[in-house]
Image (cartoon, rainbow, N blue to C red):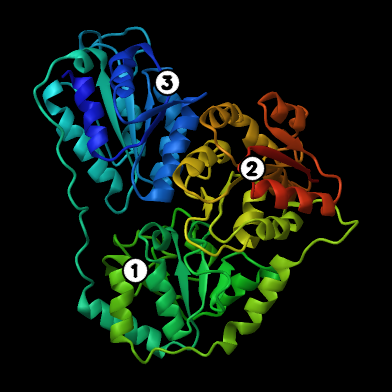
Amino acid sequence: MNAADLLVESLEVEGIEYVFGLPGEELEDILFSLRDSTIEFVPVRHEQGAAFMADVHGRLTGDAGVCLSTLGPGATNLLTGVADAHLDKSPVVAITGQGGLERLHKESHQNLDVVGLFEPITKWNTQISDPEIVNESVRKAFKLAEHEKPGATHLEFPEDVAAAETEHRPLPPRNRVRRPSPDGKAVERAAALLADADRPIVLAGNGGIRTRSAERLRSFVEQTDIPVVGTYMGKGAVSDADDHSLLTLDSGGDEQAASAIERADVVLAVGYDIAEHDPENWNPHQEKRVIHLDFEPAEVYAHYNPQVEIVSDVSAGLRAIQQEGTTITTDPEWYGDLRESILADVTRCPEAGEDFTVRRTLPLLRNAMADDDVLISDTGSHKMAIAQNFPTHEPNTCIISNGLATMGISVPGAVAADLAVDSNVVAATGDGGFLMNAAEIETATRLGCGFTVLLFNDNDYGLISEKQAEHRGEHTGTQLTNPEFTAFAESFGIEGYRPDSWDELDEVLERVVSSNEMALVEVPVE
């Protein structure tokens, strides 16, 4: 076989079903190898969309998603989606083509230092400069991408290397590396802190979802009655239907969830990445006693300086605290009223005559979606409303980018979600983020996907306008004009809706979310 065949066979051995990408001249050998494999190559409309698809695939499955581009502009177009995977701790393997080795030492057509470009946004990346190292390079890329904390890796594949012959064969994957068991003394100190606390609270982060630790976390809070507040990326670690859930850090009117963590005297941070939510917002005076439980030691930060660090498998750490601290109990009265107030705030359905807003739409959307349906949120003012006010009941059913927090992820992300899960999928987006990657609707229809695009249209980069108005009392440089979105949807052969009343919106959402058809629902908001 040639090296491209070995690369593709190695991907097959890794269990890859889809490779998302754009074709290019330097990818010819890889593309024909993919054609003859069990893997489906999915041509997309922009490399950023390919990277987002791989990103969301990784988030939902825990297995690395794969994206492919050619050299030069193809590779640079991948960067945003790969960076998103890097900061959101999503396993992704990016593969880029390159010109022949004989011209890379000099200025030449479309030649950039792609390995150098990917260096700061990957866990590991390399050029495959010899056909004899293909199998090792692929195995290493997947091992590091999926190893906690997961992230992105990158392989550059020059076209002359891809065409070269090799007698090597793929390296078989092994069981993923596990962290050691939690340190006994750290567990004892953590259990003692929690037992002595009057108002302990769990801060559930991305790692609580990512490491499949939700079941153990739910058992822990059931045993101890300790309340849970999530980060935006920790939504669903404990169901918001559970009496222990206070939703997310910013949920509820009058900062109710924030007041809970403000009153707490011990914070057990479970799988918390400070990139997803700045601890200065919830520990501004640096007085909180913090227990850090994660696969890696805590970042050094004045506002996040834990008294105890348990570096281990998250589930194993929680289990150890449970076994050590069998007497840990909390009086639910200190947070019960807060929970009721938060729920009343986020579940109130709109009344006739009220204007369309994102927040008022969310109870209708929640009612239209089953607990295991998946919501992919783009970035913008609507993301803030979803993160704070959309009750989430299962892990990985509300996908929010809050490490890089990039726009444009929802539609390509919904394509990946629709391929990865059996549940219904909704892509929630603003008009700004939607048009960044709206062309991937064509990819979705070509693949036979069936998901709903819920588009909040304010003809503005609304979140930036809000921030400017807070600071200056006015905004500038944010206003947009838009196409007729229902006609735009219909041009792709899918149904487009623009309801005029809450009853009509409710009826449309109930119908389209549960269908197996593609649809776009526009909600005009101020």
What amino acid is at disc 2?
Answer: Thr
Residue corresponding to mark 2: 452
Q: Residue at x 65, y 48 (%)?
A: 513
Q: Nearer the viewer, mark 3 or mark 2?
A: 2
Q: Position of residue 215 (x, y in %)?
A: 40, 70
Which of the two labelled residues, at mark 1 and mark 3, occupies the earlier sequence position? 3
Is residue 24 or residue 124 the one in the foreground? 24
User: Residue 113's image quarter?
Assistant: top left
Q: Nearer the viewer, mark 1 or mark 3?
A: 3
In this orientation, does residue 308 appear?
A: no
In this orientation, does residue 96 appear?
A: yes
Residue corresponding to mark 1: 293
Q: Are marks 3 and 2 in contact (CB under 8 Å)?
A: no
Which of the two labelled residues, at mark 3 and mark 2, occupies the earlier sequence position? 3
Q: Position of residue 126 (x, y in %)?
A: 23, 30
Residue corresponding to mark 3: 74
Dot 3 alpha-carbon crowd within 10 angstroms: few under 14, some 14 to 19, many 20 or more: many
Q: Is residue 76 left or right of residue 108?
A: right
Q: Position of residue 438 (x, y in %)?
A: 61, 30
